[in-house]
Image (cartoon, grey):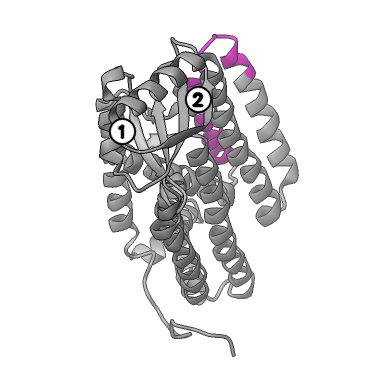
């Protein structure tokens, strides 16, 4: 018998506390949206906003504050200094959002400032520059990647759990036409993706693709909460965070599929014996031990990355910590209740009674 930390006969009423879970999710999402509105959107890193990264190796331990003070006289906009690698490497990243001067000018100025103000030997090992146009293109491509990941997941879930590949194909075709039509209006990519997500949810509801609707709502929920919390914590968004968000989407979907698979099996086995709400409660309780063990072991690994991985992957690990936690929560308290909410009306009435 496999390891279980939850008793097999556990009977937690997840459906009964769904409204409390919805309130908690709404508070987190609204707090994140409020932060984004106040700050005028996410705080983009150099990958998306444009700028430069200078990697410097120093021959002895120097505080980050000392390096920042040494180059502060250059008045570089958006100046950020971070440690890089292990503690004994003495390597640092100097980041600036400036893209109005050439990379050679930046190299010369930083070299001179460190020579004048830093009492240590150093070597500039790397200098990378991202122009604002390249940053805007990367931002658009990142949004597209997130959207198409969610769309393909919706199509897969529709065929996998409801055996409605035709309806899934109709949804994909209708969405492609809708996105093309909206694109002719010349909207910004962010608004275009938002409109496409609304169309996706609308099509899932109209075509009664309830499993796909629950999965897509859960994925959007996970991404919105992660982005919102990053905004509240004033963290930057760069390509590593987009990679983390895509990882979160995949991980959350894995949990959701496990729960949905058990719901489908129990629906077939218990049809006519249990109401739909009780089938969902039974299924979630049966998979609860596996869900906690899988998520728990993954979180331990990510926590090690967060604590000992260094500043370069610090934000990436933080995004995974938030996303995996929220993704596990959403599989139980968002995806399954959404599926329940769009189930047969007579079973809902029976459960609520």
Q: Quadrant of residue 20?
A: bottom left
Q: Earlier in the sequence, mark 2 or mark 1?
A: 1
Q: Which mark is residue 43?
A: none
Q: Which mark is residue 195?
A: 2
Q: Main secondary structure of the magenta part?
A: helix
- Seen at 29% across and 46% down, the residue is 28
Quarter of the picture containing the N terminus is: bottom right
Q: Position of residue 37 (x, y in %)?
A: 28, 26
Front residue (pair 199, 25): 25
Front residue (pair 317, 178): 317
Tag 2 and tag 1, C-beta contact below 8 Å? no
Q: Which mark is residue 118?
A: 1
Taking the image as shown, residue 315 lies to the left or right of residue 147, namely left
Tell whether position 185 is magenta: yes
Front residue (pair 284, 72): 72
- Seen at 50% across and 46% down, the residue is 219
- Seen at 64% across and 50% down, the residue is 157
Q: Position of residue 224 (x, y in %)?
A: 40, 40
Q: Position of residue 283 (x, y in %)?
A: 52, 71
Q: Which residues fall within the magenta stretch?
A: 180-206
Q: Residues within 10 Å of mark 2 (few under 14, many from 20)?
A: some
């Amino acid at each position: 018998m496999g390891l279980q930390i939850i008793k097999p006969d556990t009977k937690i009423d997840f459906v009964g506390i769904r409204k409390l879970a919805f309130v908690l999710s709404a508070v987190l999402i609204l707090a994140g949206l409020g932060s984004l509105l106040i700050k005028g959107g996410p705080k983009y890193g150099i990958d998306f906003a444009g700028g430069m990264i200078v990697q410097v190796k120093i021959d002895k331990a120097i505080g980050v504050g000392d390096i920042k003070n040494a180059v502060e006289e250059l008045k570089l906009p958006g100046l950020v200094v971070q440690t890089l690698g292990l503690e004994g490497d003495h390597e640092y990243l100097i980041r600036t959002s400036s893209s109005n001067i050439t990379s050679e000018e930046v190299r010369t100025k930083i070299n001179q400032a460190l020579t004048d103000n830093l009492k240590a030997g150093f070597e500039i090992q790397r200098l990378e520059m991202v122009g604002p146009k390249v940053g805007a293109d990367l931002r658009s491509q990142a949004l597209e990647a997130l959207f198409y990941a969610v769309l393909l997941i919706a199509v897969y879930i529709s065929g996998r759990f409801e055996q409605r590949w035709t309806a899934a194909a109709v949804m994909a075709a209708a969405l492609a036409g809708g996105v093309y039509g909206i694109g002719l209006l010349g909207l910004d990519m962010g608004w275009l993706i938002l409109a496409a997500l609304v169309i996706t949810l609308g099509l899932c509801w109209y075509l009664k693709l309830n499993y796909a609707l629950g999965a897509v709502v859960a994925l959007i929920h996970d991404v919105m909460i992660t982005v919102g919390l990053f905004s509240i914590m004033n963290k930057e968004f760069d390509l590593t965070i987009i990679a983390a968000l895509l990882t979160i989407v995949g991980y959350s979907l894995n949990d959701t599929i496990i729960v949905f698979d058990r719901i489908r099996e129990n629906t077939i086995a218990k049809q006519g014996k249990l109401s739909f709400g009780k089938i969902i409660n039974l299924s979630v309780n049966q998979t609860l031990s596996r869900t906690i063990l899988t998520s728990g072991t993954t979180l331990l690994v990510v926590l090690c990355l967060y604590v000992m991985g260094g500043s370069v992957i610090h934000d990436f690990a933080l995004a995974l910590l938030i996303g995996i936690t929220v993704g596990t929560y959403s599989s139980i308290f968002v995806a399954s209740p959404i599926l329940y909410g769009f189930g047969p009306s007579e079973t809902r009435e029976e459960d609520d009674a």
